[in-house]
Structures are given as structure tokens and as C-alpha cells.
Amino acid sequence: MASEIELELTVNGVPRSLEVDVRTTLLDLLREHLDLIGAKKGCDHGQCGACTVLVNGHRANACLLLAVSLGGADVTTIEGLASDGELHQLQRAFIEHDAFQCGYCTPGQICSAAGMLSEASEEGVALDAAEIRERMSGNLCRCGAYVNIVAAIAEVAER
Amino acid sequence: MTVLTRALGAPMTRVEGGLKVSGEARYAYEHRAQRLVYGWIVQSTVARGRIASLELEDALAVPGAVAVVSHANAPALQPSDRAELAVLQSNAVAYRGQIVACALGETLEAAREVAARVAIAYEPERHDVVLYAEHPRLFEPETVNPRYPARTDQGDADAGLATANVAIDCTYTTPAFHNNPMEPHSSMALWEDGSLLIYDSSQGAPYARDQLAELFGLEPEQVRVISEHVGGGFGSKGTPRPQVVIAALCAKVVGRPVKLAVTRQQMFAFTGYRTPTIQRMRLGARRDGTLTALVHDAILQTSTLEQFAEQAAICSRMMYAAENRRTTHRLAALDVPTPSWMRAPGECPGMYALECAMDELAISCGIDPIELRVLNEPPLDPSNGHPWSSRNLVVCLREGAERFGWQERDPTPGVRREGRWLVGTGVAASTYPAFRQKSQARVRAEADGGFTVMIGAADIGTGARTVIAQIAADALEVSPSAVRVEIGDSALPPAWLAGGSGGTASWGSAVVPACRLLRERLGAGEEAPLEVSVDTEQELEQDRRDVSRHAFGAQFAEARVDVDTGEVRVPRLLGVFAAGRILNPLTARSQFIGGMTMGLSMALHEQSVIDREFGDYLNHDFAQYHIASCADALDIDAVWVEEQDPYLNPMGSKGIGEIGIVGTAAAIANAVHHATGVRVRDLPIGPARLVRGLP
């Protein structure tokens, strides 16, 4: 049976108050209810990473989270990474290194990279190419842009 | 033909890059509509039989249920030779996972619950889903894709083999592979006054438009297909897939817009895949390695619905010189989904077999595998006796050998060990045909001094938008920033789809003359806004020169195999390609290494396993169907050699979308053999197949 629950959370800095179906995932909430289409549905099972967003600063697969479990959460999607119309440095690096082709996994890759950079910094881990590859392996790319993705992230990590 | 210069050849970043990295690029499922209804596809749970009854009471009682569309209430479609698209037209089931109904709901969650409650009873029949070499129903088709003869015979292949000084006879198998673009196939359909508007994940909107018009008995002008951004396809979005028909049917039934996305699991059933192959290779040679006989016998599957005959053996008709040659294709029509187009159809599995066999022959003859290929270089195309428009395979092999450090290679297999790793290197050749298809383009000089190029092309990640801007800029003699490109819409001039590595060649052939004509007329004093159109149909009709046009390449791989576990790593992959003029080195390199990465994935990871008992692909998700991940892609690089070819198109380019995957798996298999001394002929190569043979 469908039933709806009131939910308050913050998405890209904007407080939202919503009525959501208890079955709705964070991914469908973003895409179908808030028209934030940057987070992609590639598998809906947490296997591809295309839906990666930041929840309270940590990367998460939005398809595996029920929206109603996120009361009070602070969610950042790809649409919230740029500030004042300026692309995030990861977004610029992805363009310069041609770190995508079809673009479908790209928002997830970039959100994942953003989360990964803060994880590494918190953990005091140095990000060489091998470390980046390992930590980015939850984000699949069928176009095979991995080599360029690693180059783009490495450039930002070095700064 | 005069060759263009300036913007072409520059490493221009993608024109839609900003939209893609900021999440603003809108893919098919992400369009909006008022009164939208969500669809969820219901699949058959038997592999062959009939639907006996449909029980919908529970389903329609779900809050938010709108309807269930099945063969019982679906509108009739016009007859079509695409039986996979004749969805919901009868109660017959031809494979497990075939679409039997579509549940519709006010929300996505409701639609999914409705789908789960549709109760279907079947009258199952015995099914046959496994391909094997002695399958009793193997037959030789009249032609293989797209229209090659299924069998060719030159000289006396059997006598050639019997009298050869050195002969090998080996069988190679490849499993079914699924394209798995990251964007699942999705469609949104809206009917208005008898006309149909579809947002679709398509590699060719004009082509999809024509098929939909035919199926729904409409004039092409009554159908519009928009595919502005497409999240990969690799062939699986080339011809329309059933979901687009379902969306249109359902929207018609409920009189509201309907959108639906195929789930990742469903994609393994009805959005296409590459047939498994069983390929027997027999090569005969003189002691020095000169080929005297080449026999390539390919066994493939198709479905009972449509005949799809992958041209796996055609590469053996043109790659090497041999006096005596036979190539054959045989098919079994099984109770399985119809195989379909997947990146480098024919060449990808065929060159895996041929290039592994060449490696085995080189070892048998005791000569270097590069020298064996050089020795058997054909001066003319052996398949038809035509001269090559350009063929620089040897240049690629030599250049790659130099860059890869091939000179120091000790050919002895299984003798290099570094810690836990057995280390080896391998090489394979690569090829893909270069062709053009008729296309139209319209170019407009705008009043503000800019230009708009309009063409029904598609950008599925290839960089089409960007390269069309570069092509137009050079022909107009302006900066690419002055050019706006409109693609991905069937309302634009019809053009070849993004497939067969023929997109850029076909589209550019229309864009260049349109731009030149426009420039002439502006130069003669006409004023903007001014628009010109070009159709290449006539030019292509007249371009019947008897030359063979193919791109070539050489793939080099280093493999490391864990001496105890059989784990395989590929620390280095290098591709060297001769593909005419490279129009955008930035995006071209991405396509080459992207194809090579998919080739690596094919060699080591990918395999769709058919369930003999239930007739479905068992491992139908990313947890079980493994594709290469970031940690698998180590040092992968592609370079190219200069190639001037006047027989191609105004840009002098050959297609590059597919050649990257051709030969990669063979190079890796050959490197694994060099590392371990174990010859794995069945893909994927992995611990299960290696570990028993390890020292």
C-alpha cells in the first residue's frame, strides 16, 4: 500500500519540505520530484555508481537510500557542486582531460571523486594513480574513459 | 578530393562538455510532460510457449494503477519484418524475458507494484537455448550481415591444408556479450492529434522515426523522435528496441504521455547482445610462414523471431594473403532473444579467433608474430582483388613494436617471472571497414554572423557534435565557436545513424558541400539569413570506385598472471592505428582507448551465461556480469600514424568508433600464453581456465 510521509531535508543548500511515498528512493526523489536529473539511474541496485551523490558530505548511492530515511540530511548533487556559476575544479578537469564520452556516468564519477578527495584528506592518504583507481572502482564507465578520469582526478588531487 | 585543414586536427574539447559535467544534459527519460504516466515492463517467465491467461484484478487494485497493456488490449501494429518490435501482438512467447505486458501507474512506485501483481499463466513448451558445435539445427544462411555471402571458397582449401608444411587446427569460443551502455534504454511517448512525439535513447532518430511510422501506419511527418543526449549505445540503440514501441502503444491506450526505462536486468533480455561464437580456424603455411590455406568456420546463434547473422568470418577474407581459402557461417535459431549489433560486429569476435590463430601459427613456424603478419600482407584485397584505398598495417606493427619495446622480446613462453607474476607480451592486428551512407545536411548563415548546422546525426559519446562543428568551421572558413550544431532530432535533415564507424564520414560528406555552397553564395553577395541543403545520395551513387577501404591497427598487450591464483592483470595496452586523418585528437584518443578498454573487458571479464533450465541469461546485472572497472584500466594508450587517403570523404577520415575493440582480446590472450605457456582459447580468460595449466 502506498503511504506518504513528510520529509524535510536540504538539497544543494535549499531546505525542502516534501510528502514522499515510503517506497521512493533518494534517486527517484531527486529525478522525478525535484527535476534534479544529474544523478543518473544506471542499475538501481548500487552496482554502477551513476547515482552517486554526497549525503552529509559522504558519497552514497542514491538508488540504495529510501528518501524517508533522510530526514534532516544534507544532500549535494552534481547540480550543487558548481558555485556562483563557476564549475568545480573537478568538472573543469573532466572537460580538459576528456574524462567522459556519453556523459551518463559522469555526474556520479565527479560526485564520487569529490567525496573521495575529502575522504583521502581526512584519512591522510596520498592519492597516487593506483589509489585513485581503487577508490573510484565503484563508478563504472562503459565508454572506457577510466584512464582520462584518473588523469583528471590526479590533477585536482595534486593541487 | 581537396582535404580541409585548420579546426580539424585540433584537440577541441566537447561542445556539450559543460552540460554533461554539470548534470544539465537531458537524456530521454529526463524529459517532462503534464499528466505523465509511468510504465514498467513485465517479462515472460517461460522460454517458449503461450500465455494461457492474464489475471489483472490485484494489479489494477493497486493505488495509483492506471492500466495494464498486454496482447489482450494492445492496439494492432502494422506487419513488420522486425518481429522483436511486434510487441504485445500475440500470446506467443519466443524467449524468456520477452515483453508480455506493460504496467502503468501514476507514479514510478505504483507502476512497479502493478507490474509485480500482474499474474500470468503460461502453456510452456520445451525450449532449446544452448548453442554447441554439433547442434542438429545448424544451417547456412543466405547472407551474413549486412549482405555478405555466408560462404566463400577460393582455390582448394582442403588440399592447401593437406599439403602445408605447418598446419594448425584450433577452435576458439566467445560467450554472449551484452552491450550494457550506462544509460538504460528509455523512451517517453506523447500523442497529439494523431501525431507521435518520442524522446528516445537512439543512435539514429531519423531511422527510429521511419520504423515507428511504419509500425503505427503513420506518415513519417507524423512522427518525431528526439535523442538529444544518448548515454552510450555500442550498437544496442542503433535499430529501435521494443521499449520505444511499448511506450508509444501504452500512450495510445491511456491517452496520456507515457515514459519508461528498461531496467538493467531487463536489458539482458530484449535490448540486444552479441551472439556467442564457436570458431574453428585452420591455417596451413610453408615452413617460412607463408600462408597457403586459411579456413575460418563460424558457428553462431540467432533467434526464432528474426534472423541475425553476425559476420564473424569476413575478416578472414581480407586480412592476409592465402592462395586457398574458405570461410563459412552457420546459425542455430534458438529460443533466445535475437542477437544484435554490438561494437565491431563481425570483426570483434572474428579477429579474436584469427589473430590468436596467427599467433599459434607463428609459434609453430618459429617466427616472430609481427614478421608472420608482414610476410602475409596482401598487395590487393584478397576478397575481391581491388586495390586498397590505403593499408598501413605494417606501419602500425613496426611503430608499435618500437614504442612497446618488442625488439627485446624473448619468444619462449612461460619463462619470465617477477615475484608472484608470470609476465608476457602479445600482439594482434586490428581492422574495420570504412564506408559512407547517404545523408542530408542544412546549413544556415544567421543574421548575427553565426552559422547553424542541422543534421539528423547522433552523439552517443563519440564527440559527433564537436567534430561536426570542426568540419563545418573549416568548410565555412570560420572559427568553430561561430558554428552551432543541431543533431539528435528526426525533424532535422535525415542522416546515417551513429553506427558502423560511418557517422562522421557520412555526415561530414553532407556538411562540407553544404557549407562550401553557403560560403560561395555569401561571397557572391547574398545576405544572411541564408540557408542551403545538400543530399549526398547522388554523390555516393557515383562514388563506385573499385577500392577496398579499411582502417587497420596493431594492438600490443602485456599480461601478468599470478602463478598460484591465475589472476590476470594487463599493466600495458598500446594501440597503433592507421585510420585516415584523425579529425580531433582529443576525442579520437578517447574513442580508441575506450574501445580497447572494452576489449580488455571482453578478454578478462565479460560473459553472459545462459540458463539451460530456464532459458534466461543468469548473470543479468553488474554484480554478476563484470565489466572492466577503473582498477582494471592501467596504462592504456593509443597513437596513430599519418595516413593520406584520397578515396574516403572530404575530411580524409576513416571511422574510429569500433576498431579499438578489434584485436585487443587476441593481443591479451597471446600475451597470457607468452606469460604462462597456457593457451586459453575460450573467453573470458581467467583463473578458472588458467589455474590448472600453470606450473
Image (cartoon, rainbow, N blue to C red):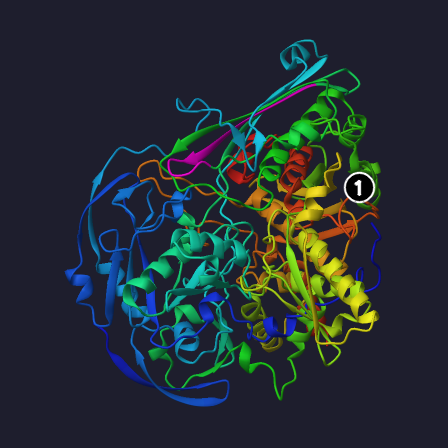
Residue B634 lies left or right of residue B490; in this view the side is right
The count of marks equals 1
Callout 1 amino acid: Cys
| Quarter holding residue A72 | bottom left
| Vertical order, B419 against A37 (above or below) | above
Q: Which quadrant is home to the C terminus of chain B?
A: top right
| Vertical order, B57 against A83 (above or below) | above
Residue B182 appears in the picture as rendered = yes
Looking at the rendered structure, the secondary structure element under dot 1 is: helix
Residue range corresponding to the magenta coloring: B293-307
Q: Nearer the viewer, residue B464 or A156?
A: B464
Residue B621 appears in the picture as rendered = no
Q: Is-magenta flag for residue B299? A: yes
Residue B88 at x, y percent in the picture: 30, 50
| Vertical order, B246 against B659 (above or below) | below
* Residue name at image x 68 percent, y 54 percent: B504
Residue B169 at x, y percent in the picture: 61, 20
* Residue name at image x 41 percent, y 65 percent: B195
* Residue name at image x 76 percent, y 35 percent: B547
| Quarter holding residue A105 | bottom right
Chain of the residue displaying label 1: B
Residue bearing the label numbered 1: B396
Residue B57 lies left or right of residue A54; in this view the side is left
Q: Nearer the viewer, residue B157 or B426?
A: B157
Q: Nearer the viewer, residue B299 or B214?
A: B214
